[in-house]
Amino acid sequence: MSPKDLTIPTGEDGEGSVQVHLDESDKITGAKVFAVYGKGGIGKSTTSSNLSAAFSILGKRVLQIGCDPKHDSTFTLTGSLVPTVIDVLKDVDFHPEELRPEDFVFEGFNGVMCVEAGGPPAGTGCGGYVVGQTVKLLKQHHLLDDTDVVIFDVLGDVVCGGFAAPLQHADQAVVVTANDFDSIYAMNRIIAAVQAKSKNYKVRLAGCVANRSRATDEVDRFCEASDFRRLAHMPDLDAIRRSRLKKKTLFAMDEDPDVLVARAEYLRLAQSLWDGLPPMSPHSLPDREIFELLGFD
């Protein structure tokens, strides 16, 4: 089935799947939902937070959900490391009815609402359970009723059943990459995972963001070969590094020329995602083909 198909399939993963299945009652409705993936350390949280800020500047009501045990997805929006859903659930002995919204939802830059799902201790539990519980809590407290945009910022390039759980909620997946082999190799794996999910869920690939890259020639070469697309290019700017150190989004930084350039690109990206993108049918490449495609002879 092609992602261009207009009929959105419903159902579960194939026979033998150990993925965490989505309860029909926990579906996110009424908001545009994006899941951000990419190689570990590529800048997904920076991209997600600045994209959330850009959506808010465009007048959208935004909720960002960090899906990483490090719980550092939203700190440039809130200025601090906020408690995770899994931590506050532990505090009430996993009785969610005892929680209040202010226990796990925090307001950040320009009204962006921030949640850190957290995750189980290393080597135990399932990240998909944590994501599911987070969405369930948000729905129980009607915190998604007035939301225009939801952004899931997902751990590394993990595409197991647990951390693929946001794809069950998402309308579109955005892949953050860089103009290097390792990042593009990880992106290729993510494309394959999202395409597999798209057979039974509404999620579709939106495209990729070339992050921290002076050029985009390797990314563009891969996109041409895989029928994928580059949505934006965030140059390797010191202003972006400084914004992380200052615990701020680019939209809260002083207006030097580099900051203004990056802001404009994020605003353009947010507007294009909001307006909707033409359908496409990307395909992942065999590993050997990527080795032959990228780099120098």
Image (tube, rainbow, N blue to C red):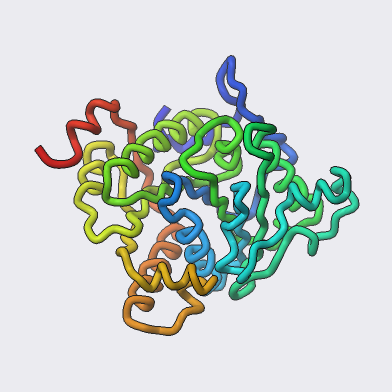
Tell which residue pokes out farthest to the left in this image.
297
Q: Residue at x 71, y 53 (%)?
A: 84
| Observer-nearest of 201 and 53 | 53
Left or right of 218, for residue 80: right
Tell which residue pokes out farthest to the top in this image.
16
| Observer-nearest of 99 and 275 | 99
Which image quarter holds the N terminus? Answer: top left
Q: Residue at x 60, y 75 (%)?
A: 110
Seen in the picture, residue 216 relative to 226 is either above or below; the reply is below
> How many numbered discs?
0
Place of residue 96 in the rendered image (x, y in percent of width and height, measured from the top left): 85, 47
Left or right of 120, for residue 165: left
To which quarter of the image does residue 275 belong? bottom left
Which image quarter holds the C terminus? Answer: top left
Asked whether residue 58 appears in the rendered view, the answer is: no
Left or right of 105, for residue 51: left
Q: Residue at x 75, y 45 (%)?
A: 136
Place of residue 287 in the rendered image (x, y in percent of width and height, measured from the top left): 29, 27
Place of residue 178 in the rendered image (x, y in percent of width and height, measured from the top left): 32, 51
To which quarter of the image does residue 160 belong? top right
Seen in the picture, residue 43 relative to 271 is either above or below; the reply is above
| Observer-nearest of 41 and 107 | 41
Asked whether residue 285 appears in the rendered view, the answer is: yes
Tell which residue pokes out farthest to the bottom in this image.
255
Q: Residue at x 47, y 46 (%)?
A: 37
Seen in the picture, residue 176 relative to 160 is either above or below; the reply is below
Left or right of 134, for residue 39: left
